[in-house]
Amino acid sequence: MKKITRNQAKHYLFDPQIPPQLVVQSGEKFQLETEDNLSGFITSSSSVPTNENLQPYTLREPPEFNPLTGPVFVEGADRGDVLAVHIEEIAPGDFGCTSILPGVGPFSDSQRWPDLNTAYAHVIPYRPGPSGTRRDGKAIFAEGIEWDLKPFIGTIGVAPDREVLSSLYGQGTWGGNWDCRDMKEGSILYLNCYHKGGLLFIGDVHGTQGDTEFTGVANETKADVVLSCQVIKNKQISYPRIEKKESIITLFATKPLEDAVRTAITYLMEWMITEYGISPKEAYLRITADPDFRVNVYQMVRTGWINYTVGAEYPKKFLQPTS
């Protein structure tokens, strides 16, 4: 299986000028090794992320967080196509880390709880699960406190059309930093292509995360990720979509949060209408009446100019594709 290792590519930009690190065929599986969001800085709970020791990353604007592996050139992909990215496997590293970064998060200037604006790192060891790997293992937060590992890709996208955007703040129709928990094994991500080969990047894998990623730093980890891609010729979508086994999800990132919710729902209705043959009126009424419809708030982090990311999700059980 073709592979990009951690020491082969570590970028902090979605940039079409970066030469491809791997060329794959449509449908071919390949492996990408990713580094954690702080570029491997944290190795133990003593690796406290202060302004001083993070200077190599924070002296840049935007800060150099969320290193990317890639780009991957997919044969047959071109501008005006959609790239369907199949997430085959996500194997986290030995541990993850959640931390308090100076100046990041909703309590970064808190006088009520000053400990919440003091640099801190909390390492979370991982234990293998029934498969013998950490793909389905456990995260051990503390003695007697553990939960299932649910790894996902936090930052993923193709090279944007004309801009060069950062792996931390970049978000758009091409992808970006969404910290979306549904970017997990078994999901298919649909992205518009703007360049020959698509030029796919990934990074910022999380072992687990709660809704909103409230502190700005969830359970961050390095990982080995297996993907495959298929090219859908001559097709464009309004914003990236996710297809899971039992549901479909449309994403959107903006501020304020209510605008992100409304737009994600609008694009979900568009998908239901154009590709499942449901009338606008029926889609509108299903969204409000079906108890299985969900709005997921994946990312609502107060830092820099990053937008809030939501996903509008509808079950497949009442959807039949028109083609």
Image (spheres, rainbow, N blue to C red):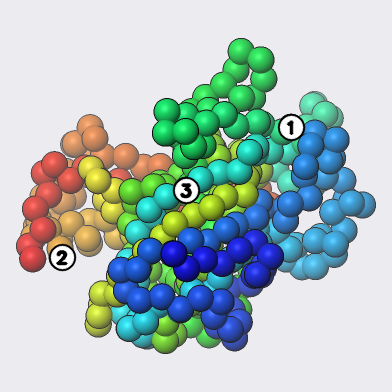
At a point 70% along the width and 58% down the height, the residue shown is 65
Per the image, label 1 sits on a secondary structure element best described as: strand
State whether residue 168 appears in this view.
Answer: no
State whether residue 145 appears in this view.
Answer: yes
Mark with earlier residue (1, 2) = 1
Asked if marks 3 and 1 touch (Cβ < 8 Å), the reply is no
> Looking at the picture, how far across and down is residue 172, in whole percent?
48, 68
Give, as a three-letter code, the residue at label 3.
Ile
Give, as a three-letter code, the residue at label 1.
His
Give, as a three-letter code, the residue at label 2.
Thr
Residue beneath label 3, please? Answer: 90
Residue beneath label 1, please? Answer: 122
Mark with earlier residue (3, 1) = 3
At a point 23% along the width and 32% down the height, the residue shown is 291
**Front tag of 1 and 2:** 1
Instruction: Judge left or right: residue 59 versus residue 244.
Output: right
Residue beneath label 2, please? Answer: 274
Q: CA distance from mark 1 to mark 2?
A: 46 Å
Instruction: Judge left or right: residue 157 versus residue 302.
Output: left
Per the image, label 2 sits on a secondary structure element best described as: helix
Per the image, label 3 sits on a secondary structure element best described as: strand
Q: Is residue 242 above or below residue 158?
A: above
